[in-house]
Amino acid sequence: MRSISKKLLVLIFAFVFGVNMVNVNAFATGNNRSLKRVNNENIRSLLTTNALEWANLIKPEVNITIGNINQVSVPETNQIKYVASFFSDTIPYGYAVFEFVDNDVVIEQSVIERGIDNIYSELMDVVDEKIGNNFKDYAVDKSVIQITPFQYAVCVTDKNKNVITYDNYGDELTEYTNEDETSYSEGSSIYIYSNNWKSSSYTEEKSSKIVLKKFTKRSTLFSEDKIENITGKYACAVQALTQIAYMEGLCTGTSKSIQTTYNLLWDYTDTKETDDSKKKTSKDKIIYGTTGTWITPGIQKSAKGFVEYAQEMGYTDTKYKGVESNPSVAWIKDKLKNNRPVLMSYAINVKGEDDNTGHQISILGYIKAKKVSSGNTWNYLMVYDGWHSTVSYLNYSTVDFTRCDATYFWVK
C-alpha cells in the first residue's frame, strides 16, 4: 500500500500550484459551458467530459481515460461531490474531486500523476490492511466521506451490522459512524416560522437570496384551515400542488376556483382517504388523504396528477422533470433561478416511532444565513409547508431526512 505521507506531499504540491478550486468551464468547450440542467441521467456524462478536459489540460502528452466515479458526501450538509479516477493504459493516474456550483462543474482538488490511485482505492487499501482476512465479512459503502479538503473516510459494515468508519490514516472515526436518525418531537419541529425568523436570531446573506418569481407575483399562501373550510378535505400533496397551480395562474384565489382545483388534483393524484379522517366537530367531518405510503411513488403520483390537471386546463405541453433523490442545494437554486416550481417529498422520524412521517411541500426560495446563537452559517429553504399562510424556513444543511425526493414542473 502506498504511504500516506507520499499522498499528502502530492496533495500539497497540487494545492500550492493552484490546482484547487479551478472552474473547468473557463476552458471547457462551448457544449460544456452551457450546462443548464444537472440530473441523475447526465451527471456521469458531464463529469466524464470535464474530467477528461481537465486531465488533457494538465497532462496533454498522456492518454487519460476515466475509471470509476464515486460520490463524496460532506457531513452536516446535503452537499454531494464526486471523485473520478484517471487511468492511462490501465495504469492508475490520479483523480479529481468535483462539485457542482450554480450548475457549473468545478474542480476542487486534483492529482494527476502516474501510479497514484484514486481516493476510494486508497481508502480500500487502508480498510484491507485493517481488516485483513476478514474482509469478506464486511460490506463497504461505495460513497466517500469528506472530513476536511484533504482527508477522507469510508464506512464498512460487519456481519453483525456494526458500522465502522476509517479515514485515510487508518483511524476509526466514531463521530462519523452511521447512527440512528434524529427523532423529532413532532412533524412541524423542523421548521422556523416567519415570526421566529428575526434579524436578532438569523443574519441573512442578502446577496444569496433567490425567490421564485412566480411566488413574488402571486404570493398568497393558503393555510390548512382555509382549505378545510372551503373543501372539507386535506392532503399535504394536494395542498402543495394547489399552491403551485395558483402561482402558475391555473386557478384564482376565489373559494370556487380553489374548491374545483383541489377536487381535480385530489382525483388526478389518486389521493385516498386515510384512517385519520375524523370529525372536528359533530357537524364538520374533515377528510384526510394520502398519495402513497412510500416517498418516491408518492411524489411520482403527485407530479403525474398535476401534469394531467394542467393539461386539462389547456397547458398541453406541461411536464414534470423526473424525480431527484436528496437534491443538492445547487439543484434547488438552479430550479428557482429558472422560475420552475419545486415539489419536495420527505420523511422524518417522529418520536422515535418505526413509521416515518411523510410530508410534501413547495419550495419558494433559498437564502444563506448565520444562526446568531451558534455562529454557524447554513443553507435555508423558504418553503410553503401547507399548514400555514406564511413562509416557513427550513435548515437544509442540518435537517435529518430519512428520505427526500423532489421534482419540478415546466408549465406551458
Image: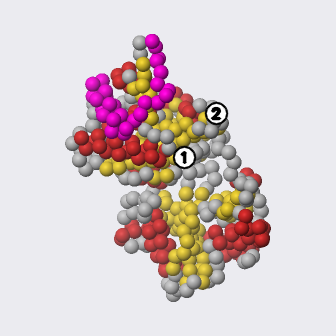
Q: Nearer the viewer, residue 389 or 301?
A: 301
Q: Earlier in the sequence, mark 1 or mark 2?
A: 2
Residue 351's disc number: 2
Instruction: Determine the secondary structure under disc 1.
Output: strand
Extreme left residue here?
Answer: 314
Q: Amino acid at mark 1?
A: Arg
35 sits to left or right of 91: left
Residue 191: tell me if it is visible.
yes
Q: Which residue is mark 1?
A: 403
Residue beneath the point at 41% across and 12% down: 283
Q: Nearer the viewer, residue 285 or 55?
A: 285
Q: Amino acid at mark 2?
A: Lys
Tell me residue 369's x, y (percent): 55, 43
Q: Which stretch is magenta? A: 253-282
Residue beneath the point at 73% across and 59% down: 158
Tell me residue 147's x, y (percent): 67, 58
Between the C-alphas of marks 1 and 2, the distance is 16 Å
Residue beneath the point at 61% across and 62% down: 143
Residue beneath the point at 60% across and 44% down: 400
Instruction: Determine the secondary structure under disc 2.
Output: loop
Tell me residue 114's x, y (percent): 62, 83
Instruction: Classify 10 Å Cα crowding around label 1: few (below 14), some (14-19), many (20 and above).
Output: some
